[in-house]
Image (tube, helix red, strand yellow):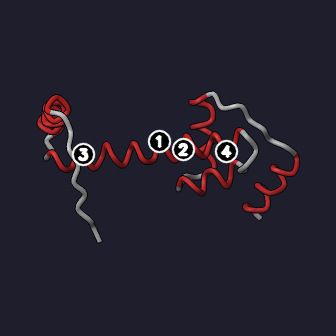
Amino acid sequence: MPVNVTTRVDEELVRIIDFIAKREGMDRSTVIRRFLLKAVRDWLVDRSLEDYEEGRLTLWQAARKCGLSVWEMIVEVKRRGVRVPYTLDDLKEDLKAFG
């Protein structure tokens, strides 16, 4: 069930949001929701990849935490230049998910 959330933003940000809304043929609320969803997803991926890089999560666990497939997470790893701390035990755990 949707919940209303209220926040204050400066006038310049509102002008930019309204410009984007007009250009994309959307209303202001839709633009804000889409940007907020993208920012939240990016944050989740950032934190999950930090945990992956530090060895606190496997790639499979990081992907699941973000709601992504392993293949989508691999794309993020490459795109963001994340150091891969992959061990043989990690590979075995990831392969169990396919079997």
Question: What mark, if any, has residue 32 been given in the picture?
Answer: 3
Label 2 crowd (10 A; few <14 / some 14-19 / many >=20): many
Circle 4 or circle 2, nearest the eye: 4
Question: Residue 45 — which label?
Answer: 2
For label 1, the residue is 42
> Which of disc 4 and disc 1 is earlier in sequence?
1
Q: Secondary structure at mark 3?
A: helix
- For the point 85% across and 43% down, which residue is it? 87
Look at mark 4 in the image and give the residue it sits on: 51
Nearer to the camera, 58 or 14:
14
In the image: residue 57, left or right of residue 78: right
User: Do residues under tags 1 and 4 come within 8 Å of each other at their CB atoms?
Assistant: no
Tag 1 and tag 2, C-beta contact below 8 Å: yes
Of the numbered discs 1 and 3, the one sitting upstream in the chain is 3
Decide which of tag 4 and tag 3 comes sooner along the chain.
3
Quadrant the C terminus occupies: bottom right
- Is disc 3 surrounded by few (<14), some (14 to 19) or many (20+) residues within 10 Å? some
Q: Secondary structure at mark 4?
A: helix
- Identify residue type, mark 4: Asp
Marks 3 and 2 sit apart, C-alpha to C-alpha, by 20 Å
Residue 75 image-quadrant placement: top right
